[in-house]
Image: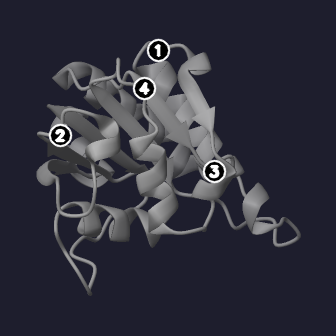
């Protein structure tokens, strides 16, 4: 069984309008939510063996803070420029490129691509079936034997967690 964790970047800051979108950092709330999601993954035993992240500043910070909270080494993160607003196909390509040795992989990226990727992989067609808020996390599972066999409609939703709910549970 393969597990796919789709983590939308945490809340970003809009305080400096001179920054390019790519360079926007996390806001204070995002700096708290990203490690909260990593702690949650560690607690429930869904720590990824492989992580692919957008290199946009807010996604990079989210991936690093989450990984640190899971007590994993940052060197396991692969930075993929195509996850910065390219297409859902690129997100699926990143999943299919996961090493065979991994059982659980995580993508850190952006909406609307996170929502459409979750919808497509779980069998949805036209409209997006998910609303993933910032730092929201969706876990998909697949009975695919190899990562390259994961295609649209081959996954099912196992669970979803959002920071607002997690804060109520853990804090």
In this rendered view, identify the residue nearer to me: 6 or 81: 81
- Which residue is at the far right? 18
Residue 143 is situated, as x and y percent measured from the top left of the image, at 11, 39
State the image quarter where residue 5 is shown. Answer: top left
Question: How far is the residue under mark 3 from the one under mark 1?
Answer: 19 Å
Q: Is residue 139 visible?
A: yes
Image marks 4 and 2: residues in contact by CB distance under 8 Å: no
Marks 2 and 3: which is nearer the front? 2
Q: In the image, residue 55 lies at what x, y percent?
A: 68, 46
Question: From mark 1 to mark 2, how far is it between C-alphas?
Answer: 26 Å
Q: Taking 171 as reference, is 52 left or right?
A: right
Q: Is residue 21 left or right of residue 107?
A: right
* Disc 3 to disc 4: CB gap under 8 Å: no
Q: Which one is in front, 99 or 81?
A: 99
Mark with earlier residue (2, 3): 3
Image quadrant holding the N terminus, namely top left
Q: Which label is found at residue 58?
A: 3
Does residue 150 sit above or below 134 in this rendering?
above
The structure residue drawn at horizontal position 44% and vertical position 22%, both measured from the top left corner, is: 69
Q: Earlier in the sequence, mark 1 or mark 4?
A: 1
Q: Residues within 10 Å of mark 1 (few under 14, many from 20)?
A: some
Task: Identify the residue at horizontal 28%, vertical 56% (top origin).
Answer: 151
Q: Secondary structure at mark 3?
A: helix
Q: Which residue is mark 4?
A: 99
**Whether residue 33 can be seen here:** no
Determine which residue is flagged by label 1: 72
- Residue at left offset 19%, top offset 74%: 124
Q: Is residue 114 left or right of residue 11?
A: left
Q: Looking at the image, is mark 1 or mark 4 nearer the viewer?
A: 4
In this rendering, which labeled residue sits more in front, label 1 or label 2?
2
Rendered location of residue 39, percent (x, y): 33, 25
The residue where tag 2 is placed is 144
């Amino acid at each position: 069984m393969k597990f796919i964790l789709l983590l939308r970047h945490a809340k970003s800051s809009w305080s400096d309008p001179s920054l390019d979108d790519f360079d926007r950092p996390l806001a204070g709330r995002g700096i708290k939510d990203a490690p909260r999601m990593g702690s949650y993954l560690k607690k429930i035993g869904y720590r990824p063996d492989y992580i692919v992240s957008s290199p946009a500043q807010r996604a990079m910070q989210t991936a690093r803070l989450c990984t640190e909270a899971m007590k994993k080494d940052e060197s396991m993160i692969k930075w993929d420029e195509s996850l910065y607003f390219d297409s859902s196909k690129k997100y699926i390509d990143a999943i299919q490129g996961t090493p065979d040795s991994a059982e659980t992989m995580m993508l850190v990226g952006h909406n609307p691509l996170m929502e459409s990727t979750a919808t497509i992989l779980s069998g949805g067609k036209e409209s997006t079936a998910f609303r993933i808020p910032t730092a929201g996390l969706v876990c998909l599972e697949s009975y695919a034997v190899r990562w390259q066999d994961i295609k649209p409609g081959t996954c099912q939703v196992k669970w979803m967690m959002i920071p607002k709910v997690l804060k109520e549970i853990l804090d």
